[in-house]
């Protein structure tokens, strides 16, 4: 049996420029894009858009719609809509609606299998830019299971997804605590057991604060270059052909690892910033050994979390670092020249020690999710092939 035997409709979305343009202000309608799917973004993180009533009615997302990325490096990644929502999809994706005789959750889980990924790679990688056609998607073979059997399989697998999602929500909460702590200490100057006698007015160059970028800081602090307390250095590129199968993430220009290797060139904790491409300047903390490739990295554990929080706070300034018209780049020398608040060294260490347990809690949750995903991947092919009974 093939996917075309159980589908109701399959359509590409609205033109991303003319009919569903992303706007830089809050709107009543969201638009899901390839990056929203590949980066597993929440609904509130999707792009804002404005569309006419006719297009909205035709391309509105409803519960159990399945979206599949049709172009680019992440072709084939998918997303299932859990509730009706005020959102449309653009032409980087295919929306699949299924007949009532099939369980949508089952088909979504089927799209997570290695067999589906291999099939998509085979039918879409016919040119320099991967492209998935609707008719090729619909030719994918699916198991001929009864709907009750599909529902049982989907229920088992969705439990893993739910546990992973709960952990991700906990991580987001912890990240907010870290961000709020930095602002409380170094922007609002409300630090536990720290007396501030005098303040001075400063203008951090490159920041966007309003009021002519003026702010007040304790007189003992200063606005200085990041390189005064530590430096980012360039990673070492590695090609896919050079990677040896392992579990060390290779951090490159994208949001997610570009692959996995059997050795690392950066140990324990690090901060990375993507060096080139559409995601140049993307800031990420890493709580495990990595191979730093097409990125810049920072790995001084003494003040690493202070540096991360400082850069996270001035993310708009980082956006302005991109150079190059055709291919944006962010270089270590530019990162190291960024202006940050520099308090006394013992206060930097105090902050680092204060938030370190929070990062360790995040590390534990990430490891839980890694194990859950591993368990799911082991179970997925056995359930889909019928080797593992569900009755």
Image: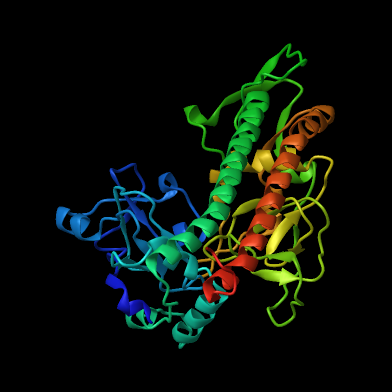
Name the residue located 61 percent from the left edge and 66 percent from the top edge: 379
Where on the picture, by quarter, is residue 219? Answer: top right
Name the residue located 58 percent from the left edge and 72 percent from the top edge: 381
Q: Is residue 268 left or right of residue 207?
A: right
Name the residue located 59 percent from the left edge and 54 percent from the top edge: 282
* Residue 201 visible in rendering: no
Counting from the top left corner in percent of width and height, residue 59 is at: 25, 60
Picture mark count: 0
Outermost residue toward the bottom in this view? 126
- In this rendering, the answer to whether 177 lies above or below 201 is below
Image quarter where the N terminus lies is bottom left
- In this rendering, the answer to whether 128 lies above or below 69 is below
Outermost residue toward the left in this view? 54
Counting from the top left corner in percent of width and height, residue 134 is at: 33, 78
Q: Is residue 11 left or right of residue 155?
A: left
Name the residue located 73 percent from the left edge and 46 percent from the top edge: 363
* Residue 371 visible in rendering: yes
- In this rendering, the answer to whether 250 lies above or below 167 is below
- In this rendering, the answer to whether 368 lies above or below 136 is above
Q: Nearer the viewer, residue 216 or 91?
A: 91
Where on the picture, by quarter, is residue 350? Answer: top right
Counting from the top left corner in percent of width and height, residue 349 is at: 82, 32
Q: Nearer the viewer, residue 27 or 6?
A: 6
Colour scheme in use: rainbow
């Amino acid at each position: 049996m093939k996917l075309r035997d159980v589908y109701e409709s399959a359509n590409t979305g609205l033109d991303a420029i003319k009919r569903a343009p992303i706007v830089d202000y809050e709107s009543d309608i969201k638009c899901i894009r390839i990056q929203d799917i590949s980066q597993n973004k929440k609904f509130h993180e999707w792009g804002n858009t404005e569309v006419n009533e006719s297009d909205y009615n035709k391309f509105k997302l409803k519960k159990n719609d399945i979206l599949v990325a049709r172009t680019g490096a992440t072709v084939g990644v998918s997303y299932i809509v859990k509730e009706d929502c005020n959102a449309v999809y653009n032409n980087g994706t295919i929306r699949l609606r299924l007949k009532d005789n099939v369980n949508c959750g089952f088909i979504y889980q089927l799209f997570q299998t290695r067999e589906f990924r291999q099939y998509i790679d085979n039918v879409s990688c016919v040119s320099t830019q991967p492209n998935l056609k609707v008719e090729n998607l619909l030719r994918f073979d699916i198991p001929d299971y009864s709907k009750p059997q599909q529902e049982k399989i989907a229920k088992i697998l969705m439990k893993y997804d739910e546990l992973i999602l709960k952990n991700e929500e906990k991580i987001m909460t912890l990240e907010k605590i870290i961000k709020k702590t930095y602002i409380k200490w170094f922007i609002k100057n409300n630090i536990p057991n720290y007396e501030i006698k005098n303040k001075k007015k400063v203008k951090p160059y490159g920041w966007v604060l309003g009021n002519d970028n003026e702010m007040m800081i304790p007189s003992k602090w200063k606005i200085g270059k990041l390189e005064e307390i530590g430096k980012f250095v360039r990673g070492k590129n590695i090609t896919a052909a050079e990677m040896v199968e392992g579990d060390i993430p290779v951090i490159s220009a994208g949001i997610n690892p570009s692959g996995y290797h059997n050795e690392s060139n950066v140990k324990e904790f690090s901060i990375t910033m993507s060096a080139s491409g559409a995601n140049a300047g993307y800031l990420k903390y890493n709580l495990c050994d990595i191979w730093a490739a097409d990125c810049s990295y920072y790995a001084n554990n003494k003040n690493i979390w202070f540096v991360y929080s400082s850069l996270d706070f001035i993310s708009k300034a980082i956006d302005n670092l991109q150079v190059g018209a055709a291919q944006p780049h962010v270089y270590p020398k530019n990162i190291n020249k960024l202006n940050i608040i520099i308090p006394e060294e013992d206060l930097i260490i105090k902050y680092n020690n204060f938030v370190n347990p929070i990062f360790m809690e995040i590390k534990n949750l990430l490891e839980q999710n890694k194990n859950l995903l591993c368990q799911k991947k082991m179970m997925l092919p056995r359930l889909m092939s019928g080797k593992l009974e569900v009755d």
